[in-house]
Amino acid sequence: MKERFKLIPTSHLILIKDNKILLLRRYNTGYEDGNYSVVAGHLDGDETFIHAMIRESKEEAGIILKPHNLEIAHVMHRKVPGEERIDFFIKARDWEGEPRILEPDKCDQLSWFELDKLPENVIPYVRQSIENINLYASTSHRSPVHK
């Protein structure tokens, strides 16, 4: 029997406050260390991308997200050597708690950056997604999540 095509699903958090986006600098992970990303993670199985984002946000940054405050901001299909990924970028309209580093073995800095002044060392696909979300924020269809 032929093996089915597989995609690796991930969720990424777009957390914006006062026209600034929260970015974390990766550290000691073996992937894009020293570069900035957003709170993100793989789905663990038996969870939706929304529930994965809620879980990852609590684990990585100590913030509490509620499904009714989340909306799908962007979806990206990426091909990387040996695999393909589907990345969901979820925008939070509201959250509880102040973001902080909860995984110091994977992240050495957490900062807010102006949307139009991102640091040079943002992971390229993350930068592209942030720029697309920012560019189309006023014109794109919003897909709120209700569950």
Image (cartoon, grey):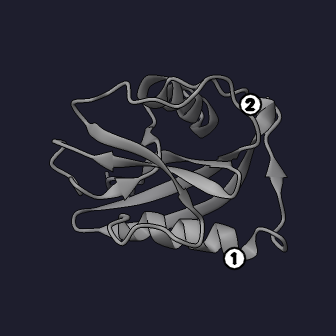
Q: How far from the left and from the top, in percent, is residue 37?
A: 40, 54
Q: How far from the left and from the top, in percent, is residue 146?
A: 83, 34
Residue sitting nearer the eye, 61 or 89: 61
Q: Is residue 46 visible?
A: no
Q: Secondary structure at mark 1?
A: helix
Residue sitting at x 31%, y 51%: 1
Residue sitting nearer the eye, 144 or 79: 144
Q: Amino acid at mark 2?
A: Pro
Q: Is residue 82 left or right of residue 54?
A: left
The part of the image, by quadrant, that contains residue 34 is bottom left
Q: Is residue 32 visible?
A: yes
Q: Is residue 33 left or right of residue 140?
A: left
Q: Is residue 129 above or below residue 20?
A: below
Q: Is residue 32 left or right of residue 139?
A: left
The residues tagged by marks 1 and 2 sit, at their Cα atoms, a distance apart of 24 Å
Q: Amino acid at mark 1?
A: Leu
Residue sitting at x 55%, y 28%: 47
Q: How far from the left and from the top, in percent, is residue 56?
A: 48, 30
Residue sitting at x 70%, y 30%: 95
Q: Is residue 8 above or below residue 139?
A: above
| Circles 1 and 2 in contact, beta carbons < 8 Å | no
Q: How far from the left and from the top, in percent, is residue 58?
A: 51, 23
Residue named by callout 1: 135
Residue sitting nearer the eye, 112 or 127: 112
Q: Residues within 10 Å of mark 1 (few under 14, many from 20)?
A: few
Q: Is residue 54 above or below residue 121?
A: above
Residue sitting at x 22%, y 63%: 82
Residue named by callout 2: 67
Q: Residues within 10 Å of mark 2 (few under 14, many from 20)?
A: some
- Dividing the image into 4 quarters, which one contains the C terminus? top right
Residue sitting nearer the eye, 10 or 91: 91
The numbered mark, 1 or 2, whose residue comes first in the sequence reads 2
